[in-house]
Amino acid sequence: PRATAMTRTPFLLASAVVAAALAGRGPAPAQTPEKAAREVPDEPGKDAEPLPPPPVADPKSKVTPLNPDKTLFLEVLPDGKTRRVLLSCEVCLREGPLEVFLCKKNTKEHEAVLRVDADARQIALALEATGAKKGTPVQFVNPKTREADYKPATGSPIKVTLHYRKGGQLHTHAAQEWVWNHKKKAAMDAQWVFAGSREIRDEDRPKDPPYYAANNGEVISISNFPEAMMDLPVEVSRDDESLSFEAKTARIPPLLSKVWVVLEPAAAKK
């Protein structure tokens, strides 16, 4: 995909670090797969649940929007050091195999449970403002020998929490509870890491800014993708015959219901 010229947009930011990082760094919009557009209704149904109030960790937290659409927020707790990223998302799929947990809007809705109308690069920069350290995307081929050489994604472990309404009741739990491993007959137990995706330059337009590959859709992946902003640090196949993970339909609210996704650095699982 080609990057387009950047458009500077003013953002309300909770820290000078984020403000400096975000200035003038908007990538090109991702292309829209036709299948994704067909899978999601144009308008929410009568049973779609509205967005609850932000699930702040402390009543005295400061929550600041980081984009004009107010789908990306930074929460700063009263200690001034602890920070979390809040994303206002919506349900785009409730059943079937999954390769992605959270995609950018108008990209991979046909294989993701949730979508967010936000720039993946800005989400990554907000994560860095929480203290999360970007690692490396998954590797399938050794860049020197060109031989098969799998290396899992690395980076800070990230706790992903969902907060939403279903049947009029509030629910808060780990995102893994929406992902069912049909081979193990249990919820997914792997923890995501902040891989950081990768930047792609257009050789025909070297002066253009690089394109942030996670804007293709892989904001929070389940199958391994080199483009993923967040990925699982374990080998997960993308072959249809080998897909282990599917949506846990009974846990997920109706299509286009609004859901908060909370991202915060976490201790690595032992």
Image (spheres, grey):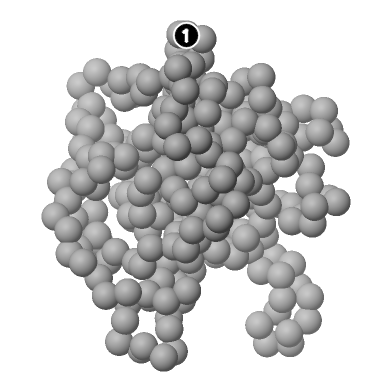
Question: Taking 29 as reference, is 101 left or right?
Answer: right
Q: Nearer the viewer, residue 268 or 75?
A: 75
Question: Taking 235 as reference, is 167 left or right?
Answer: left
Q: Residue at x 68, y 27 (%)?
A: 248
Identify the residue under disc 1: 169
Binning the other alpha carbons within 10 Å of mark 1 as few (below 14), some (14 to 19) or many (20 upward) gives few
Indicate the quadrant where residue 208 lies.
bottom left
Q: Residue at x 31, y 40 (%)?
A: 71
Give percent across and percent down for residue 224: 66, 57
Q: Looking at this rendering, what residue extends furthest in the top direction?
A: 168
Figure check: 14 above or below 197: above
Query: Where is the C terminus found, in terms of image quarters?
Result: top right
Q: Is residue 230 visible?
A: no
Q: Is residue 18 visible?
A: yes
Question: Taking 225 as reference, is 22 left or right?
Answer: left
Q: Residue at x 32, y 74 (%)?
A: 4
Figure check: 98 above or below 23: above
Q: Residue at x 37, y 59 (%)?
A: 121
Give percent across and percent down for residue 110: 61, 46
Amino acid type, label 1: Gln
Q: Nearer the viewer, residue 229 or 79?
A: 229
Give percent across and percent down for residue 43: 42, 32
Question: Taking 165 as reference, is 245 left or right?
Answer: right
